[in-house]
Image (cartoon, rainbow, N blue to C red):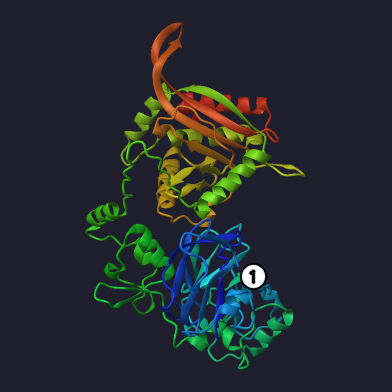
Amino acid sequence: MAIKVTMPRLSDTMTEGTVATWLKKVGDKVSEGDILAEIETDKATMEFESFNEGTLLHIGIPEGETAPIDSLLAIIGDEGEDISALLAGGESATPAPAASTEEAKPTETKAAAAPATLPAGVVVVTMPRLSDTMTEGTVATWLKKVGDKVSEGDILAEIETDKATMEFESFNEGTLLYIGIEEGNTAPIDSLLAIIGPAGTDISGIAEGIKAGGSAPAAPTEEAKPTTTAAAPAAATATTQEPATATSADGGRIFASPLAKKIASDKGVNLAQVKGTGENGRIVKSDIENFTPAAAPQAAAAKTETTAAPQVFVPAGEVYTEEIKNSQMRKIIAKRLSESLFTAPHYNLVIEVTMDEAMKSRATINSVPDTKVSFNDMVIKACALALKKHPKINSQWSADAITINHHVNIGVAVAVEDGLVVPVLKFTDAMSLSQIGASVRDLAGRAKNKKLGPQEMEGSTFTVSNLGMFGITEFNSIINQPNSAILSVGAIVEKPVVKNGQIVVGNTMMLSLACDHRTIDGATGAQFLQTLKQYIENPVTMLA
């Protein structure tokens, strides 16, 4: 019977998704675990697997189109089946798959819901909190099935958060006795994810105890309806499920995790050239990250050649427009920056900084072998020290109180292909210039390769945005909330300046501080800029 497939909620912040690519077309056979489409969220493009098998009878959202979660994405059923009732919104056909039902009623049972005394060696594993903004997670892939041996450090599953897909390692060893959240299903943190213990342990009492608690996923019974087959425990589908695969040049199957395939795609790595270190030769994340092909430069050049956007020839005198669909990242940037600009009363303070001593100091520092410090690194270090002296700048607004942060976590704005991300340097004031330089290069590089973890983009207390490398001499930024301020850094300009009553050639740089007037008064912002100017113009004081 035909089954409705709806737009999945792939993160707790997702309200709509864009179909980037359909990997199946109407009339194609679909097997359980096949990738139906690639769905673009506000943070990433993710593969969406089918929990059902049959024939793809209808596509509800074409490629490039955006729709709210739970919108009709596709219909899967028997070849030639009449789906007019489903298209008309009727309920005569089989209801939506169990994956959607379970998502609509997320599980909430915590480990505490299990019996007070567990059998010896039995451990209840719950949905982990992989970032400080995560409230629920989606199991992208189970790398173990019920009955498998589990060692400490083994990868149990790949879990999707609102920002990334992460491998979840086991902290225990034993046998995987029970799976509580099936592949593709979403559940709140602390929901029952799995039970690990000695082989043959009777866990029926544990499962029943959690069921009695009210909302954890229950093990399906023999009376389970056909439509819930896709959400059955891994043990029931172990004979038909396989790891995510790709195809080699000779048509052979290459086993790789979805996360490994995503990273390989981003880096332009041919999976056929990678040797897997996972179970049964499966390619995992670390294999891709450690892969160094001999022909990488040629491959990169070929990729650039094939992916370069074609030039559009427009005859003179003709009106020509081009429409580019907004990505989910672009939509979120627009939403959050609009909220920041229209809710926080912005004002800007501008100061000109003499850079002659900074230029001399940087040249001296970089003369040390294996040391590379940029002017941006020096600005970040100066900001960190100035924030310690002016903690009101390092604050955030709420309706009830102003929070002053006495730790300094500086976010560094990095432009990426789809928009802008802000990786965070934790405890920046305790870092040396060389540590700041190395960390910024590492974070910026991984940001552009979409390899940052969500925890690396959270917790900033102040932000620095630098467009000086593009020749921009002065600009104003929008505050990256919940921060109260952001510093805009311009280019270093050689020009005539007055020193000791004489006109000489000097080097200067413009700094613009955007402040939230709810937390920072003008005089407070001005004092911060004065301190910042002193540090930058006298770099030796940053080393004291």
The quarter in which the N terminus is drawn is: bottom right
Q: Can residue 481 be seen here?
A: no
* 116 displayed left or right of 372: right
Q: Nearer the viewer, residue 122 or 451?
A: 451
Q: Residues within 10 Å of mark 1 (few under 14, many from 20)?
A: many
Q: Name the residue at the top extreme.
A: 501
Q: Position of residue 215 (x, y in %)?
A: 70, 77
In which quarter of the view is residue 202 placed? bottom right
Residue lying at 41% horizontally and 26% vertically, measured from the top left: 492
- Rendered view: 196 above or below 72: below
How many discs mark residues in the rendered view? 1
Label 1 SS: loop
Residue lying at 42% horizontally and 52% vertically, measured from the top left: 446
Q: Position of residue 382 (x, y in %)?
A: 51, 32
Q: Name the residue at the right extreme.
A: 400
- Rendered view: 531 above or below 244: above
Residue at numbered disc 1:
190
In which quarter of the view is residue 179 placed? bottom right
Q: Position of residue 271 (x, y in %)?
A: 31, 68
* 493 displayed left or right of 488: left
- Rendered view: 120 above or below 411: below
- As shown in the figure, which amino acid type bears the numbered disc 1? Asp
Q: Can residue 462 be seen here?
A: yes
Q: Name the residue at the bottom extreme.
A: 222
Q: Nearer the viewer, residue 82 or 298?
A: 82
Residue lying at 44% horizontally and 51% vertically, measured from the top left: 447
